[in-house]
Image (cartoon, helix red, strand yellow):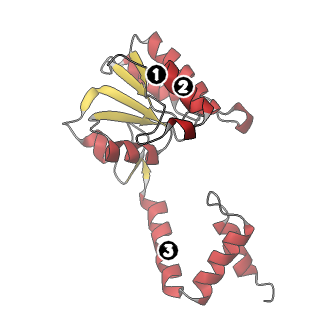
Amino acid sequence: MPHLPVVQRLIEALRCLPGVGPKSAQRMAYHLLERDRDGARRLARALDEAGERVRRCRLCRSLSEDELCEVCANARRDRSLLCVVETPADTQAIEQATGYRGLYFVLMGRLSPLDGIGPEELGLDRLGARLAEGEVRELILATNFTAEGEATAQYISTVAREHSVRVTRIAQGVPVGGELEYVDQDTLSHAFRGRRDL
């Protein structure tokens, strides 16, 4: 196929998606152009509309079409519980899998000095101000169990303790239905250290 600048721009644009390399982006672009022009137009309209209408919730920083997201606007949620997560997808996972009825604070990332992501980029000044108001009694840390996620959790726990807020961390360990012989050593070690009374 001859070099077409508009196709090259489409391929490069698709590469902004996580996990999409040059070959995957090329396959997607060719698929849309060769077999699904209507899908390409729907995708373009949906991206344009989302880019125009979606913003961050004023309280939790999650994605929302309004000033407050659906969770923050719900007066029946327990405002004394605040769960800190890395992404809006994490809030969705918690909402679908648990009976949690508190509020959230979405970091939109995790501390990563090498990538230039510090406390300011995660809105931790806003989190500190929210904790200073005194409404939050328990802060639940639900960051990922990566090195950066753990560092972020430690940093936030220090901020919370400065405001005399109870800090808890979601548990980690052996998955439901998992067999010990197939669990990796780090997971098993954390599960063993985090054991509790029955």
As drawn, which residue projects farthest toward the left? 76
Q: Amino acid at mark 3?
A: Leu
Percent position (x, y) of residue 19?
A: 64, 58
As drawn, is 35 to the left or to the right of 72? right
Element at label 2: helix
Q: Residue at x 35, y 16 (%)?
A: 197
In terms of sequence position, does the residue under pointer 2 or pointer 1 come before the other? 1
Percent position (x, y) of residue 107?
A: 50, 36
Mark 1 crowd level (few <14, some 14–19, many ≥20, 10 Å Cα):
some
Q: Residue at x 42, y 18 (%)?
A: 167
* Vertical side of 15 occupied by 30: above or below: below
Report which residue position mark 1 lands on. 128
Element at label 3: helix
* Vertical side of 13 occupied by 110: above or below: above
Mark 2 crowd level (few <14, some 14–19, many ≥20, 10 Å Cα):
some
| Residue 67 visible at all | no
Distance Cα–Cα, label 1 vs label 3:
39 Å
Q: Residue at x 71, y 64 (%)?
A: 21
Q: Amino acid at mark 1?
A: Gly
Percent position (x, y) of residue 122?
A: 55, 34
As drawn, is 18 to the left or to the right of 2? left
Distance Cα–Cα, label 3 vs label 2:
43 Å
Q: Residue at x 66, y 77 (%)?
A: 27
Distance Cα–Cα, label 2 vs label 1:
29 Å
Report which residue position mark 3 lands on. 43
Report which residue position mark 2 lands on. 190
